[in-house]
Image: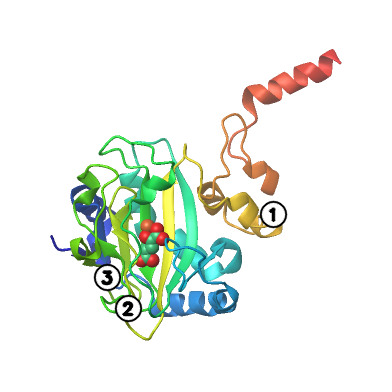
Amino acid sequence: MPIEHLKPADGPERIALALARDGCAVVDRLAEPAALARVQQELAPFIEVTPTGSDDFGGRRTKRTGGLIARSPAAREFVTHPLVLGAVERVLGHATNFQLHLTQVIAIGPDEPAQMVHRDQWAFDFFPFPQGYEVQCNTIWAMTDFTAANGATRVIPGSHRFEDKRQFHEMDTEPAEMEAGSVLFYTGSLYHGGGANRSDVVRMGLNLTYVVGWLRQEENQYLSVPLEVARTLPDDLLRLMGYVDDTRDPIEVVKPGAAREGFGELEAAQRQLRRQA
Ligand SMILES: O=C(O)CCC(=O)C(=O)O
Ligand SMILES: [Fe+2]
């Protein structure tokens, strides 16, 4: 089954429909080349000093550089891209809210073999989520061209409906070939893996993933983004990073006075306790 390729003008609804049907879709040439160049430039020194992986899954010739909200102001625009958030909102809309899960540049070096075919949602201790209840919606933006030769992500369209814990091989998958600036969307339930890099260039992807609000984030944004940086970020990004709570608005910790809602019952209870003291 081929991977559906969409245009930016097709809009979030079409992306969500493709994800419901196939579990994956590519939107071609969504990023402005200048925006992509800024991300490259801001992250180059961090990627440079990132060690390669220490196991086969992470990839011994692959570098994974995270903490991108703190390290790259330009990457924040990708995290909050309206078309992406529009699609994610539709894919994860059955949950009350969703949050940022992981921000990572994945740089697959020459001679890296294909990664094991997997579902990203296996990271939640292989919990058997019901089929059709998506918990994760992922993007990987091509920072370089993605080709079959240089390690384009390999996917099995339609496999979001397959049984869990199955094993597949490279020949069962298809490469998500796309030009730099394009973005592959895939659900946490889609069987996929990083491709083998049989070229002499590094394949670089910007992996930005989102998860329902009730699951733990893979990258803890409160630790990966220092408070001084968090204080400079837009409120909507902070909320996406997980600054939410049930009785009070944790955005108060970062920006006193920015809360949309008061402290409610909790605040009333604290006043009462003070009066009694
Ligand atoms: O880099 C890629 O193309 C995908 C990597 C991947 O699927 C993963 O690390 O979970
Ligand atoms: Fe993956």
Q: Residues within 10 Å of mark 1 (few under 14, many from 20)?
A: some
Mark 2 or 3: in front is 2
Q: Are marks 3 and 1 in contact (CB under 8 Å)?
A: no
Q: Residues within 10 Å of mark 2 (few under 14, many from 20)?
A: many
Instruction: Look at 38% across and 79% down and name the residue there.
Output: 111
* Amino acid carrying mark 2 in the image: Asn
Residue 272 sits in quarter: top right
Q: Which residue is mark 2?
A: 150
Instruction: Give the Cα distance between marks 3 and 1.
Output: 35 Å
Work out which quarter of the rendered image holds the N terminus and state it.
bottom left
Residue 258 visible in the shown view: no
Q: Within the displayed image, which quadrant is ligand 2 positioned in?
A: bottom left
Instruction: Look at 43% across and 47% down and name the residue there.
Output: 123
Question: Which disc is residue 28 wearing?
Answer: 3
Q: Answer with mark 1 or mark 2, whichever residue precedes in sequence.
A: 2
Q: Which residue is mark 1?
A: 227
Question: Which disc is residue 84 wearing?
Answer: none
What is the residue that sits farthest to the bottom in this orientation? 200
SS at mark 3 in the image:
loop
What is the residue that sits farthest to the left in this orientation? 1
* Amino acid carrying mark 3 in the image: Asp
Q: Position of residue 47 (x, y in %)?
A: 54, 75
Q: Position of residue 178 (x, y in %)?
A: 27, 73
SS at mark 2 in the image:
loop
